[in-house]
Image (cartoon, rainbow, N blue to C red):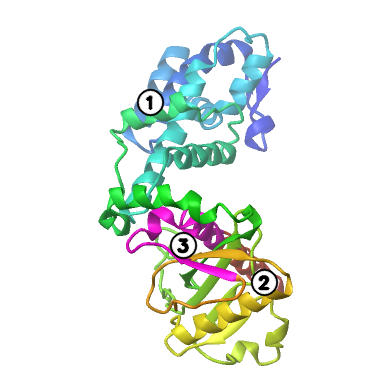
Amino acid sequence: MSLTSTAYFGGNAPTTYPNFVLSAVTPALVKLHSTIANQSSGSDEMKSGIRALTEKFQVGKTQIADIVSNTEEIYKVWVENGNEERKLTKLRKCEGSVIDKELLVWFSKTREKNIPVSGPTIQEKAKQLAEVHGLNDFKASNGWLEKFRKRHNISYKSVCGKASAVDRIAVDDWKKKLPNIIDKYENRDIFNADETGLFFKVLLNKTMAFKNETCSGGKVSKERLTVLLCCNMIGEFERPLVLGKAKRPRAFKKLDVNKFPVDWCWNKKVWMTTQIMTDWLMKFDKQMIKNRRKVLLFVDNAAPHPHLKLQNVELVFFPPNMTSHCQPLDQGIIQQFKKLYRKQLLQKAVADLDLETLAL
């Protein structure tokens, strides 16, 4: 069996590569492809590699160039034609180098933004890259992670910032007291509430573009909402409170605010106030009274949070400067909420772009 260019290259006139050429050239191509995978087609390394192959196997540069550009497809045919016993080590090195390079770029850009990156996060990103490249056999194991870390001199470090001001002894003391605080409550009756800022129009600050294209017209949106989230230990959540700048924004003109899946309120500075928080706590308490539930509610010690005596809600405040270590919502829940929001926002943007394209 021989392989023609039309089978993989889509050419008009078939160019046949004899089996002896494929069987001889393919192993060399795997090594070549691994070495120059990250080089442009016009680079000196690419040109010298092609010249070496043409001289060694006495075939034309065009044939070698076609084979180089379709190494993976030809390799599959080569294996199917009786070469199963040959190991895939060289090809895997090539595949691994693609993931390694793209992952390192992603990691560097992420750290430039001062975003913490954990080991599992790197492994998950590597899996995503492998899926994109169709590398179904790639395993982002702990061993692979350790090699990647050592290869690029990546170390584990503590994140400095809000959490750095925390007194570890005070945190440990608080955690020792916690069992006595929650002891008389069922898991479903232990809640945590906290606010977070949401830049609700922010999409992407970069775009794919042609090399000679000038990118302009982009502007990072600073339009912000404040969202109060509240959930219990078993994952049940209360109706979110969303705080905007206007009582009735223009986007709500034809909408019934009372039918929203959230409670809407407003403040010109889009900040939580003592009055808004008091109203929310009173409403939450009335709901628990109606449901005949005695509950525990943890909140941080922010200035707008009032110290109220409620009927069915025991209000407990986290000690100062410990929220990042002690508050459940800060352990990934708020982050996940924002990720899901961003995902749905991007999906809507893509859908809108598709509609605009169809209208052209």
**Residue 142 appears at what percent x and percent y?**
46, 27
Secondary structure category for the residue under label 2: helix
Foreground mark, 3 or 1, reads 1
- In magenta, the rendered stretch is 313-339
User: Which amino acid does the dot numbered 2 rest on?
Assistant: Met
Left or right: residue 5 compared with residue 302: right
Q: Which sits in the foreground, 157 or 202? A: 157
Residue bearing mark 1: 147
Label 1 element class: helix
**What residue type is disc 3 on?**
Thr
Q: Position of residue 290 (x, y in %)?
A: 73, 75
Q: Residue at x 64, y 54 (%)?
A: 186
Which residue lies under the disc numbered 3? 207
Q: Residue at x 50, y 23 (%)?
A: 92
The residues tagged by marks 3 and 1 sit, at their Cα atoms, a distance apart of 32 Å
> Are there few (<14), some (14-19), or many (20+) residues within 10 Å of tag 2?
some
Please indicate, yes or no, whether residue 360 appears anywhere in the rendered image: no
Q: Position of residue 297 (x, y in %)?
A: 54, 65
Res. 106 visible in picture: yes
Which comes before the other along the chain, label 2 or label 3? 3
The residue wearing badge 2 is 288
